[in-house]
Amino acid sequence: MKKIIAYLLTLILFVGCSTSNNDEKISFKVNDDYTNFSVTLDEFETLLNAYLSELIDGYSEKSFSSVATDEYSELRVDDTTVVEAFFDDNNVVEYIRVHGFGEADTVIGERVANVAGTIIGMSDDEFDHDTLSDNAFNMYDNCTRIDQTEAYGSAVQDHYMMSVDYIETGEYCNFSIWIRPSEFENNEDYLASTDYSTTYGAYCTSITEENEEEISEEEQSSQPTQQPRTYWGEGMYKVGVDIPAGEYNVIAEKGESAYLDLSSDSTGNSRILNNVFENNMYITVKDGQYLTLKRCYISLE
């Protein structure tokens, strides 16, 4: 799987085009306080449609639509890929997620990587895009667990943070790339921060020096049984496969309004419940259900 994601990240396209809004160019960059971007949701939609029209043959303009929570909207690029824009009370975009779900192959990964790269390519700020994606993959590479089914990586370049999140469940995968403003100017500052150590501790607890190199299937079968998993962050999980059935205390990220969705299938069309909450909430899940967590996590430690 590491080879697949490495390949996908090399496909990230940072392209540019010029677009206008009332004959004035829309500026997309990190604001001076590093808490959001310089565009409203409507302006981001205009930019995104213009850029994706150049990237994807036959692409037709799409609109952001509201979802269960009023904190973000989503624009569906195609049947597998969605752009989610999180915004504040003034509709100013705070951060972005490009997400794909479907069969675990390179097709979804290519689309997610290309769309995310295109969004970063909108930026008026000039910085080393290749270094940003390389550093994100370097962390990802060190966060791959023994079972090779999940990994995470993040990096910072000139106040832009890119995070790569991959979850594989049998034949299906969730692949996300997050784009956020960052208070850190470069990756060296980020690596030295408590933000990085906290993230690394949450996602990379299973990795050891012996497991940092590629493990063949034969070697994996000879590995001792992995310790029970105690942390599940953002993503979609199939109960009975990714997470055991039972009752859980789901904890919102500090200062965040979290979102939880429970469905009987992976499409979300057979929703059992969904909820926006702060602090924490308890939920009981059964085998075969699909649990989606956003801005929250489950920790058994």
Image (spheres, helix red, strand yellow):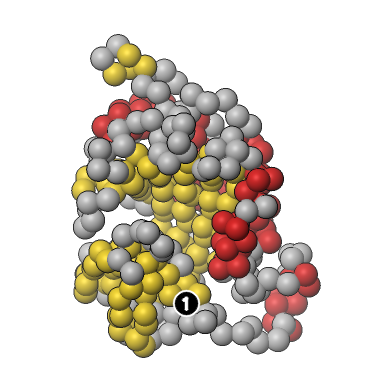
Of 101 and 47, which appears nearest the observer?
A: 47
299 above or below 247? above
* Snapshot quadrant of residue 29: top left
Q: Residues within 10 Å of mark 1 (few under 14, many from 20)?
A: some
181 above or below 255? above
Mark 1 is on which residue type? Answer: Ser
Residue pointed to by mark 1: 299
Q: Give the residue drawn at x 30%, y 33%.
A: 40
Left or right of 274? Residue 186 is: right
234 above or below 192? below
* Snapshot quadrant of residue 282: bottom left
Estimate the x, y position of residue 43 in percent, counting from the top left: 30, 29
> Can you see residue 7?
no
Most extreme residue toward the top is 23
Left or right of 217? Residue 88 is: left
Q: Give the residue drawn at x 42%, y 47%.
A: 98
